[in-house]
Image (cartoon, rainbow, N blue to C red):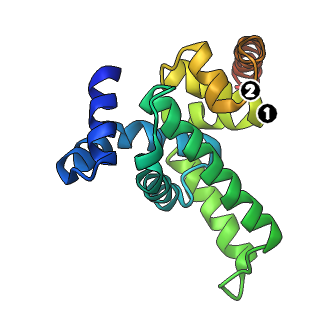
Amino acid sequence: MDDSDLLALAFAAGRGDHDAVTGLIRATQRQVHRFVVSLNGLDDAEDLTQETFLRAMRALPAFAGRSSVRTWLFAIARRTVADHLRHLYRRPPQAAVPDWVAVAESAGRHARIRFDDHHALVDLLDRLPPDRREAFVVTQVLGLSYAEAAEVCGCPVGTIRSRVARAREDLIAALGQDRAAG
């Protein structure tokens, strides 16, 4: 679905059209979910994606269309994840199992057994500094332009270009190190 179709859905949804709300969510949910996963990992991704859309639906009546719908949603998702992380850091989680060390070690062994290309890519992306990972995923995975990415990330276009270039360099170096390590 192109930007003009999404814009029409967003305006209709903002006026209370329930079918437009459904269409807008269906058209953008995968990309928003992927973006949330890139920022926070798989933990809580479903909940954070849902929270993003709840916030977006509350804000739809005020949506003026000054940016693309995807850019607007990614900005909301970014703030949703940031709020979630702030909440987590204020309240560290407590282990719900008596022997958390054994559970963590067994999960680590199990994860290595099922390691595949997808996990290798996620691992490489996780090694990037958060600002570079965000810029790389938004432009190279989700396909936003540098201008849209700058709007989502809240920084100048030149900063996005720099972060993406450095992320590429970091990924190439990390891949080379992994291959050299065997």
Tell me if residue 68 can be seen.
yes
Residue 102 position in % (x across, y down) = 70, 75
Q: Amino acid at mark 1?
A: Pro
Residue 117 appears in the rendering: no
Classify the position of the C terminus by image quarter.
top right
**Residue at horizontal 74%, vertical 80%?**
94
Q: Secondary structure at mark 1?
A: loop
Please state which of residues 176 and 25 is positioned toward the viewer in this rendering: 25
Q: Give the image quarter of residue 133.
A: top right
Residue 172, horizontal then vertical, whole percent: 71, 14
Residue furthest to the bottom in view is 98
**In the image, which disc is placed on residue 40?**
none
For the N terminus, give its image quadrant: top left
Residue 82 coordinates in the image, percent (x, y): 70, 52
Left/right placement of residue 160 relative to residue 22 reads right
Q: Is residue 3 left or right of residue 126?
A: left
Disc on res. 129 = 1
Please determine whether, in this image, residue 103 is positioned above or below residue 20.
below
**Residue type at mark 2?**
Arg
Q: Which residue is mark 2?
A: 132
Expressed as whole percent of the image width and height from the top left, the position of residue 141 reads 51, 24
Residue at image point 46% right, 40% down: 63
- Check if mark 1's residue and mark 2's residue have beta carbons within 8 Å: yes
Left of 140 or right of it: where is 99?
A: right
